[in-house]
Image (tube, helix red, strand yellow):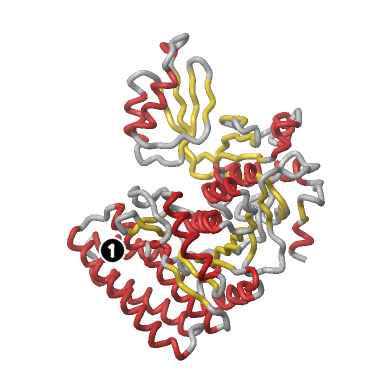
Amino acid sequence: MIVMKFGGTSVESAAAIERVASIVRSVEERRPVVVVSAMGKTTNKLLAIASAAIHGKREEYIRQIHDLRDYHSREARLVVPLALRAELDRTLDDHFQELTELVKGLALLGELTPRSIDAISSYGERLSSYVVTLAFRHFGMKAEHVDSRHVVITDKRHTHAAPNFPETYARLSAVIPPLAKHSVVVMGGFIGSTEEGVTTTLGRGGSDYTAAIVGAGIGAEEIQIWTDVDGMLTADPTILPGGHRVKTISFAEAAELAYFGAKVLHPATVVPAIEKNIPVLILNSRRPEVPGTRIVSEAVPCGNVAKSIACKRKITLVNIHSTRMLMAHGFLHRIFEVFDRFETPVDMVATSEISVSLTIDNTGRIDDILAELQQFAEASVEKNQVIVCLVGDNIRYTPGVARRVFHAMDDINIRMISQGASLLNLSFVIAEADLLRTVSLLHEAFFSELDPAVFERSEAVHA
């Protein structure tokens, strides 16, 4: 069995769903289990509906619900056989009636709780997985729909629930393999439920995570993440077009890249795959002939120092200084206790005896944090910063990497620098305004020559 996850852009329209059906049909003999995201921007639209409801904008949320139903009906009817149209309409009616009642309840309460967010945002995957199941039947495949909420069991931390792995794996192994013997199994990503049956979600990028959980639970031979890019590239294409495709990368390197901004993969995705040693492939549903990127347990030999450049934007740099803490123990403990109390994760840290610089990407409690810090230190923030991260297994073995970075960025102000504890990355903070130039200079310095066993030049990919 293999797991194939298709993102929102891969199922955003009838034409896109037809492409997905063609891809799945070509590997039907491998007993694929298909995990799909919500169609297009459906999750964002659902949250907009909820926002309109709690702000008392009744006409607006009713219009948005109608528009969303029309969108699903229009695209689905193009890929669902005539014999199943009545079933399609009935299912859409049931889901949107249920959604409307939920939204009316939100309007009465005037409040959106984490539990309500999960309930309303779950409809995207519930609808898309059902539509894709019917479409597969239209395109000549036997297909069975499985509601992910029946097999992915989580804790009660709504909007970012953590799976109960023993229970989830037990349910997956009992339910999925028997169905996959005779049919393509289709599931919605991102969603699960508590043991009591209350709907939860796995947080941002949760459909990737679902795919990895399912793959680990059924002992899949491979997990495929189908998106709209050719795989992992040597640079973020939204910042620097023309990056080269990385053919093979290790789990550890992929996790570093994902954490530091490589959006083709959610950081948590690789965890179940690592534990079960299941290869993960990143592939392009619009260009299925491209081999993509294969993520494996161990780093492959590579002639290049780095595999890719990742960027994490909208970063805030917090600088903390206190001469009173010279030679005093507990300075770092007091600092991180403040961030812990306000539930604000820290990305990077650089320290001296009396100074600490660190970065955060969630500034929702920054005023409270600064007020606490200023009780025992001077504290200030610098906004509109970016973490740029050079990732590669060879960084740990190669002397002079920092010198090459500084030489390439001779006239760019680096606000903070850190070599990760994993030794797989060299990271630094710069101003947002310097991002494009920084990535361009680093890309030229580290990827002008490529090891052909690990990389494919973009000219060859896009010829």
| 328 is higher (above) or lower (below) than 283 | above
Q: Amino acid at mark 1?
A: Ala
Q: Which residue is mark 1?
A: 52
Q: Secondary structure at mark 1?
A: helix
Q: Quadrant of residue 332?
A: top left
Quadrant occupied by the N terminus: bottom right
Rendering coords of residue 185 (x, y %): 51, 70
Residue sitting nearer the eye, 218 or 160:
218
Residue sitting nearer the eye, 326 or 89:
89
Instruction: Locate residue 82 relative to residue 407 in the image: left or right.
Output: left
Q: Residue at x 57, y 83 (%)?
A: 139
Rendering coords of residue 111 (x, y %): 23, 55
| 282 is higher (above) or lower (below) than 316 | below
| 208 is higher (above) or lower (below) than 9 | above
Instruction: Locate residue 329 relative to residue 292 in the image: left or right.
Output: left
Quadrant occupied by the C terminus: bottom right
Instruction: Locate residue 418 relative to residue 36 in the image: left or right.
Output: right
Residue sitting nearer the eye, 380 or 451:
451
Rendering coords of residue 310 (x, y %): 61, 45
Rendering coords of residue 29 (x, y %): 65, 72
Q: Residue at x 37, y 76 (%)?
A: 69
Q: Quadrant of residue 191?
A: bottom left
